[in-house]
Amino acid sequence: MAGAGSPCGACKFLRRRCPPNCIFAPYFGSENDAARFAVIHKVFGASNTSKLLSAIPAGDRCEAAVTISYEAQARLQDPVYGCVAHIFALQRQVASLQAQLVQARTQLAHLDRRQQWLGFAPNYHFMEEDGSQRQQAMIIESDADHPHDDPSTIISWSSQVLK
């Protein structure tokens, strides 16, 4: 029972008297929880939710009630996929970010090779796979200072710089 004589949010929504051992009372105790239970009731039904919560160990029921509520909200937004649609969207986002990371590392390696070829020491910070940071020295030259696309001009330009 939610309080002195007042029913829990679930029993309030179901318009019934809240028994002292109400399975919903610890997880749907207030007026706001009546609206949250209404969504759960619409998607799963009170009986199924009661059976589900009863089958779960008491220590895990609070997290289960939150999860059931989240899944019910997701099912209302997307009746076919529910929260799986959110998972798919996050997986696509992770794949996209991983591709961007590979592209950035490829560009960085290309620039590093170009600068090493020209005799420059790179200077940049980047995160290693294990979370540590590594720093290298880098001299940034403007494109106007050296024509780096033609190998013959690079050799002549680098020989002038090294003199």
Image (cartoon, helix red, strand yellow):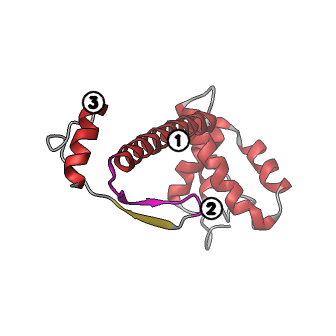
Locate the C terminus by quadrant. bottom left
Residue at the disc numbered 1: 98
Image coordinates of residue 28 in percent, x first then y, are 62, 59
Q: Closest to the observer: 25 or 6?
A: 25
Q: Amino acid at mark 3?
A: Asp
Q: Is residue 23 above or below residue 80?
A: below
What is the magenta range?
Answer: 118-130
**In contact (CB < 8 Å): disc 3 and disc 1:** no
Q: Residue at x 23, y 39 (%)?
A: 156
Return the disc, 3 or 1, that comes first in the chain's sequence.
1
Graded by Cα atoms within 10 Å as few (under 14), some (14 to 19) or many (20 or more), the crowding at tag 2 reads: many
Q: CA distance from mark 3 to mark 2?
A: 81 Å
Pointer 2 residue = 7
Taking the image as drawn, is residue 17 in sight?
no
Mark 1 or 2: in front is: 1
Q: Is residue 14 magenta?
A: no
State the residue position of label 3. 150
Rate crowding at label 3 as few (under 14), some (14 to 19) or many (20 or more) other CA atoms within 10 Å. few
